[in-house]
Image (tube, rainbow, N blue to C red):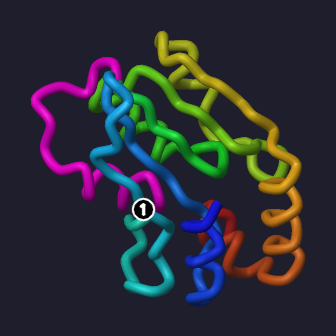
């Protein structure tokens, strides 16, 4: 959650993510930087994926994300064959995690109360930014 709080303190969306290797290594982590960098593609999972650099294979990797992945991020998971997605919460946004699940990606939904509270506060305080982030406005 420190990555998410850092993003929020910078005026961005409070979502962090990490990409873990098959043996538990942590080749990449990042936070949503769409606002800070003016880059609409720089969701937290994208930042973590970029930080991990090129891998010969993504089989057996896990992406951990604060929020249910949208279709864009779910497409990244499917395209590169990421095996598992761990989601902090899906109450404030239930993205596209059902689609990778139907294609054999293991989905673990933690439903973390602290994460839910942080996102509910963000949605209340920054509805326009939240809607922009999820493609709703």
Residue 118, x across and y down, in percent? 81, 66
Disc 1: CA contacts within 10 A as few (<14), some (14-19) or many (>=20): many
Instruction: From the viewer's perspective, tell me whether residue 111 is left or right of residue 98.
Output: right
Instruction: From the viewer's perspective, tell me whether residue 38 is left or right of residue 6.
Output: left
Residue 104, x across and y down, in percent? 48, 10
Nearest the camera: 61 or 79? 61
Task: Name the residue that disc number 1 marks.
Answer: 30
Residue 44 in magenta stretch: yes
Give residue 13's quadrant in the image. bottom right
Question: Which range is magenta?
Answer: 43-60
Instruction: From the viewer's perspective, tell me whether residue 101 is left or right of residue 88.
Output: left
Residue 15, x across and y down, in percent? 60, 62
Residue 28 in magenta stretch: no
Q: Residue at x 65, y 43 (%)?
A: 68
- The quadrant of the rendering that contains the C terminus is bottom right
Q: Work out whether 115 lies above or below 70.
A: below
Q: Residue at x 26, y 56 (%)?
A: 50
Instruction: From the viewer's perspective, tell me whether residue 29 is left or right of residue 90.
Output: left
- The quadrant of the rendering that contains the N terminus is bottom right
Q: Secondary structure at mark 1?
A: strand
Q: Residue at x 70, y 44 (%)?
A: 88
Q: Residue at x 85, y 83 (%)?
A: 125
Q: Work out whether 73 lies above or below 21.
A: below
Residue 19, x across and y down, in percent? 38, 42
């Amino acid at each position: 959650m420190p990555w998410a709080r850092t993003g929020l303190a910078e005026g961005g969306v409070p979502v962090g993510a990490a990409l873990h290797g098959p043996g538990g290594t942590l080749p990449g982590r990042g936070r949503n930087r769409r606002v800070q960098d003016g880059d609409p593609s720089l969701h937290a999972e994208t930042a973590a994926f970029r930080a991990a650099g090129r891998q010969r294979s993504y089989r057996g990797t896990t992406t951990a994300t604060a929020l249910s992945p949208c279709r864009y991020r779910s497409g990244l998971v499917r395209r590169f064959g990421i095996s598992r997605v761990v989601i902090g919460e899906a109450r404030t946004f239930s993205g596209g995690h059902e689609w990778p699940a139907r294609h054999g990606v293991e989905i673990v939904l933690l439903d973390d109360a602290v994460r839910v509270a942080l996102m509910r506060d963000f949605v209340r305080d920054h509805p326009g930014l939240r809607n922009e982030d999820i493609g709703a406005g």
